[in-house]
Amino acid sequence: MGATDALVLAGAAAIVAGTLAAGFRGFSRAGLAWQSVGVALFGVAGGWVLASGHAVGAGFRGDVHAAFGIDGLSGFFLLVIAVVGAPAALFARDALGADGPGRSLAVATGVFLLALVGFVCARDVSTFLGFWELMTLVPAAVILLARQDREARHGVFVYLAITHIGGAGVWVSMLVLVQHGALGGHPLGGGLAAFVACASLAGFSTKAGLMPLHSWLPRAHPLAPAHISALMSGVMIKLALYGLIRVLFQWLAPPGLWVGITLIAIGVLSCLGGVLYALMAHELKRLLAFHSIENVGIVALGLGASLVFRDTGQPAWSAIAFAAALLHALNHALFKGLLFLGAGAFSRAVGGLELDRLGGLLRRMPWTGWAFALGAMAIAGLPPLNGFVSEWLTLQSLLHLGVASHLGVALTGAVATAALAGTAALAAYCFVKVIGLVLLGSPRRPECAEANEVPVGMRASMVFLAGACVVLGVLPALLVPTLAGLGPGHVTLQTGAALNVPGTGSLPTVALAVALVVIVGVLVRLASGRRAAPAPTWVCGHPSAAGLAWSSAGFTKPLRLVLEVLFRTRREVQVSTSAGVVQSVTYRAEVPHLFDTLLYGPVSHAALSAAVLARRLQSGSLRAYLLYLLVLLGVVLALARTGVLG
Amino acid sequence: MSAATLIAGVVQVAGGVLGAPAIAGLIQQLKARLQGRRGPSILQPYRELARLWGKSGVAPEPHTLIYTLAPAVVAACTLLALALLPIGEHAPDWGLGHDSLVLVGLLALARFAVTLAAWDTAGGFGLMGAARDLMFSVFVEGLLLLVLVLLALPLHSTDLLSMSHAATLSAVWPEPAHWAAAAAFCLVILAETGRQPVDNPDTHLELTMVHEGPLLEYAGRDLAYLQWSAAARHWMMLVLGCELLIPHPGPFAAQLAVLAGGLLVLSAALAVCETVQAKMRVLRVPLLLGFGSVLCLLGLASWFAGGGG
């Protein structure tokens, strides 16, 4: 038994032990610590497999006997699970109470971690689909354990309904694949490949939260406790992309250029749609959930570009685009995990997370605040953090799609490039708003003025994630060549202080970061001389009134007006006058979620109408049912007589 | 290091750090002449920077470290971006590479810092400018990337050096794609430097400011950093315009002459544009930039329709 096997077994044992222990009174904190250690061991094993390139355990098999194993791709996704799972469990250790619901949540956390790990290690169709379902069901149970109100129940219902209707595509595609032996090493080709590609796109993209089948995500993610939200947004939706990668890159023979183009189109829709609705969201966790849609969209852009490059005979860029997608998946897991944990910390300190009722938290909670600000900068795609590196690689891939092919592909690439650049700018817009409203300015309600920093375990997990964002931002070149080796195509990239990608001016991450820090340090030192006595911010000599402070809606108003045609804001103004004098004005505005009003609304209406029609058949009268039977019998006899039934 | 690279390095640093305010002064001077005024001297921006350097900073209430760091971050980003610029088709290797998307990222970081500082002091006027600036940036970045796609067409590279090398290959652009890119880049220059019709750099009316708005709470050396950065961004955009979009074949001396001439012509063009154009409604700016995007896509289509160079 090799060292990796031992690590994996120890990790599994630690998670199982932690899950069982968490159920006992007084052991839930220790149990979560064990879970954290266990998932970290899995991460080490995954990282080892990724770095060494030697797969362990079974390979994929075409039968239905349970089998487990780790290859490079699984190893990478184990790493993704571990970098979020370990800090999340540590966070939960301090965040969850030791009472009944807290203990149940601690157990559920362990089961969720096992499901995530099991899914990427599954090597046959039955365990693959089994863990897939478990991964879907556990968060629903967690939400119902944590909250029993009507909104939560409805959110869970929508989550389960959409992920199961859309997820049917996963079952269909997996069963077809296994029936034709694709898992056993013979990629499926022919007309059936197109069918499987469509089914898997629908199925996995539902679970990944890609538009237009995303509607469950902004409902379900904000409801869960912070550490489960972090796991759902950071890891669970990435594992759907893992499934998609397995199907599209390994188990299917290339069905044609249209698959890649479709994936790029879905990616453009998701990243723009996600970030635009995030800008219009005024509650922190809902806003973060919409950003998850944006970021899986960016990963989808990378994967789509990789497919198109593969099919147009550019192996080097195919590998680079694939590495870009994987790197962005890891980066998003890091910063989105960090941001959700930060939201949990704020929620613990001050209660509600309405953006307009926070403010000034950076001074009260410096650890959480600065870690959260770093995460926000990373997700906004700013140098020298990790979000910039993966967005740079994705942008380069799309841009090279635009220059080196024929017209249709080039236009797709150019439009996607512009869309991703716009997305990055919109994300920066959004997180300027978030940092400003949550961390800066004056406290907007008394709780914020008296907020206390969270316990050390919660702080440590956030600081770890923020540190990882910085490290991956400065040293991505250690990881990118390995990731490029996992994809289709082939490219030789150097490991070093800079990301030297052919066809670009290179991204010297270390030099940029060092230069930035040194120059900023020198300039701040030069400017730090005399300062005048503190004085209030200047607002034309008026005292600054709290009611006049900028709100989330106000800051995004220019964009809302420019894109009025997309947002279709509903405004209600009520002016009450008495004797010709205006007494009061009330104003309400809301941005409806267009997908709900234009897509999901009509569909659910149609389904309900169909149900009403079907109900007419069920009169409850025995005579009517007998009549149905008689008619059916007559029809069958008639068919048999005409020979249709053989 | 060859002599050409050395000279390019000197132009990069000396031009960007010391010469940039002169461009701003030159535009002001030309504009004043066109409007029948005598106007301030070309050296006026230097005098203002010197005056600000001697003054003390302010400490508005409330503020955090972000307010203190922002001007230095903006200046540092601008300085690093200057080091990426090609001069002629040369540039010294500062170890930072010469990638155009890195330059876009640095500009985005500078914008992020300055708009965040507006939130830090939470002043009404600063945030008004910040919100508008960020709204513009969405469309500007999209358009700028499309221009870069067109510029990467000949040599399949986003390296600024190879892009400027592509501009030495012929005396006149043979492809409509380049003309489309040039037209679209002019719109990027207007928006990115905050010139009319996008923004009025001379205004001191708080309600109409865009780029100047978030600077309201600063004084002293902090403000000097920010004003120098604004001037250097002018310089950077104009140099990029000259080096990537004006063909400059021939020896290095001729390329430098083209750069000097191009800077003068573009400055004069900005002055004329500012004199004859009124400021546009804020909400119509995206339409203007959207027009540029359509132009770029048409340019791209023409490239591939013509056989892909």
Image: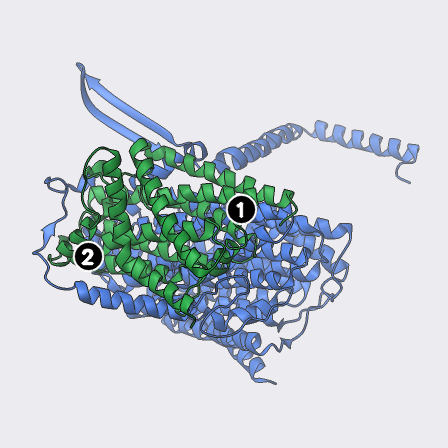
Chain colours: A blue, B green
Q: Is residue A391 above or below residue A585?
A: below
Can you say whether A419 is above or below A83 in the image? above
Name which residue type carries label 2: Asp
Front residue of A104/A370: it is A370
Q: Residue furthest left?
A: A533
Residue B65 falls in image quadrant: bottom left
Residue at image location 51% in from the left, 61% down from the top: A504
> Residue B239 at what x, y percent from top left?
38, 53
Which mark lies nearer to you, 2 or 1? 1
- For the C terminus of chain A, the image quarter is top right
Which residue is disc 1 drawn over?
B173
Within-10-Å neighbours for mark 2: few <14, some 14–19, many 20+:
many
Report the amino acid beneath label 1: Trp
Q: According to the image, label 2 marks what residue?
A: B222
In the rendered image, residue A575, in percent from the top left (x then y), is placed at: 25, 22
Measured as percent of width and height from the top left, residue A224 is found at 42, 54
